Image (cartoon, grey):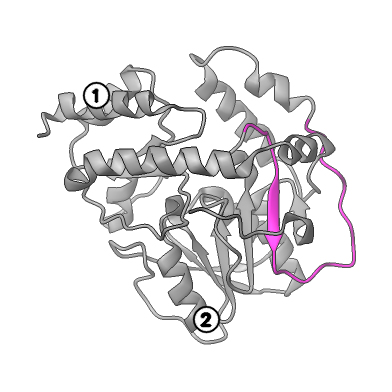
Amino acid sequence: MFCMKKNFESSIKLNLARSCLRYVIRAYDIREMYVPYYICPVIFKALREEGCRIRIYHIDEKFFPAQDFGKEDFVLYPNYFGICSRNVKKLSSLYKNLIVDNAQAFYAPHVGLASFASARKFFDVTDGAYLFGCKKLLRGFEKDDSEKRYPALFSGGSSDFFERFCANEELLDKEPVKEMSYLTERILSSVNYEREAKRRRENFDYLHSCLKYNNELDVELEDDDIPMVYPFKVSDERAGKRLVSEGVELIRYWEGVHGDCYERELAHYLLPLPVSAKYEIDYMRKLVDIIKDEMKLL
């Protein structure tokens, strides 16, 4: 049974996950960091803005780093889609300077030198991130003002949500490190985290029970893992196109990846199926029906 393992009151509350990473770099005066090739491009931008040298590493089919690191190296590792807690535990036992990006694993417990989680990837907020384990900087930061962003993102129907989402992302891309806004703090203080987690895991488990034998990824969760999406990888583009045509919100990760590597396969063929708590099981059935109809799965 899921149990919350984070103490948000002891965290450092900032506006964005990338701000958390920038905070860690400043707190430990990090000059060089290993970063996976398969990650959101805003991470590379954040490191460059902090003057931190980027060392790229690749991942294998288990999402595990395809190379070893030095014992003193600073290594950023994302808990991909919230399904990689086993990798996180193993890496934390090997590298003392592991920094865990839990932007896609909000509920994951803190592990490593520092870890950070993004609230807006899981809940209806325009900003908000929590940094755990990091030593505090002496200087403070300006409070974010998010009130103007909420109507722009959440007012209106679902038909143009993706366009509004992208517009909000462009606004956030210009934001410096700030503290979490008062409005976002108030909204997050009213979230029933246990209920949200239960529904999200139920949705995930249903999709996995129906699609696991056709999923090219070997997905195996820990009992208390609460993923962000169900990552369904299939080397057939028909299902993805049909889902989009049916109005399913598919935010692909990360389509700018180039070259002859496994990460390019993920960017091109992985379908991140939504498991948000706002969806009932009936919606999960709809997703399965669309995929099976399009691919003629048994």
Residue 268 in sight: no
Q: Quick check: is 125 in the magenta stretch?
A: yes
The amino acid pointed to by label 2 is Tyr
Q: Is residue 84 left or right of residue 206?
A: right
Q: Which residues are magenta?
A: 124-146
Q: Disc 2 marks which residue?
A: 95
Q: Residue 8 falls in which quadrant of the image?
A: bottom right
Q: Disc 1 marks which residue?
A: 290
Residue 151, horizontal then vertical, whole percent? 71, 19
Q: Quick check: is 139 in the magenta stretch?
A: yes
Point out the tag, 1 or 2, that comes first from the N-terminus: 2
The amino acid pointed to by label 1 is Ile
Residue 183 in sight: yes
Q: Is residue 203 left or right of residue 47?
A: left
Q: Nearer the viewer, residue 88 or 174?
A: 88
Residue 244, horizontal then vertical, whole percent? 34, 23
